[in-house]
């Protein structure tokens, strides 16, 4: 896996194609990260693209773009990763980022029960605004490095929710890296198997 152009572009790309007649050509997959503010969306994206973590919170405004190139199941892929803002006041812009997405990752913080309660709202938002059939969905409980005494969302409850809603489920820690690579590998493999 290698990281590609780290050029934040503030306009989302649209019309990404996932099929090509040229077998050697890179295929594009658009992934969007959604979830409440401060759950760790940017941190997961930064861990995946750059294998780094920063403990200071820097709020995301609008959306931030990065890309990663990788080969999965013999397919050369370019992953277009859109990290979006969780802050309420940016909500009206979000459909610009997720409307053509092939994969949506909904993140909550295992130490904040409200962020888990919001997952249904995020799913509803996707259902209302786009045709999500064919889109691979993941539910991600982040900050699993935190102490068990700080946990507010049980893994069993989240696994159950993910099953009921046809989502791939992972707990991750952007801080330690736990689960992050496996999450993207699993999601992308699933998408490639079902759609390419
Ligand atoms: N302990 C721990 N802290 C984390 C983890 N991931 C993120 N954080 C911290 O949580 C805070 C918020 O992380 P962000 O990645 O900025 O959250 P976000 O979801 O992108 O927030 P918005 O951009 O406002 O939507 C930061 O202080 C991070 O350092 C994690 O896995 N473990
Ligand atoms: Mg962010």
Image (cartoon, grey):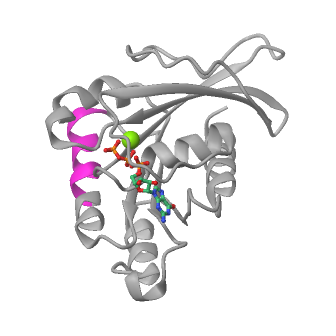
Secondary structure mostly seen in magenta is helix
* Picture quadrant of residue 161: bottom left
Residue at horizontal 45 percent and vertical 15 percent from the top: 9
Q: Residue 95: percent from the left, percent from the top?
A: 27, 29
Q: Residue at x 20, y 33 (%)?
A: 90
Q: Residue at x 60, y 21 (%)?
A: 6
> At 28% from the left edge and 52% from the top edge, which residue is drawn?
36
**The quadrant where residue 196 appears:** top right
Res. 105 visible in picture: no
Specify the quarter for ligand 2. top left
The magenta stretch spans residue 162 = no
Q: The N terminus is located in which quarter?
A: top right
- Which percent across, then down, holds residue 102? 50, 33
Is residue 164 in view from this perspective? Answer: yes
Depth check: give the residue in front, 196 or 149: 149
Of residues 92 and 47, which is closer to you in this image? Answer: 47
- Name the spot of residue 158 as percent of width and height, x first: 41, 73
Q: State the count of labels.
A: 0
Magenta-drawn segment:
120-130
Most distant residue in the bottom direction? 149
Report if residue 125 lies within the magenta region. yes
């Amino acid at each position: 896996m290698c990281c590609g152009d780290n050029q934040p572009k503030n306009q989302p790309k649209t019309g990404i194609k996932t099929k090509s007649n040229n077998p050697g050509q890179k295929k594009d997959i658009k992934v969007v990260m959604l979830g409440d503010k401060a759950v760790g969306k940017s941190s997961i994206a930064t861990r995946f693209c750059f294998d780094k973590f920063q403990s200071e919170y820097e709020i995301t405004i609008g959306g931030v773009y990065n890309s990663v190139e990788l080969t999965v199941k013999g397919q050369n892929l370019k992953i277009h990763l859109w990290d979006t803002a969780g802050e309420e006041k940016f909500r009206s812009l979000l459909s610009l980022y997720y409307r053509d997405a092939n994969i949506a990752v909904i993140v909550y913080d295992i130490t904040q029960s409200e962020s888990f309660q919001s997952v249904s709202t995020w799913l509803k938002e996707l259902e209302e605004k786009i045709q999500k059939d064919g889109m691979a969905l993941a539910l991600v409980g982040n900050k699993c490095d935190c102490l068990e005494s700080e946990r507010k969302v049980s893994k069993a409850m989240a696994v159950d929710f993910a099953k009921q809603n046809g989502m791939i489920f992972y707990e991750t820690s952007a801080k330690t890296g736990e689960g992050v690579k496996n999450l993207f590998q699993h999601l992308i493999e699933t998408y490639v198997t079902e759609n390419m």
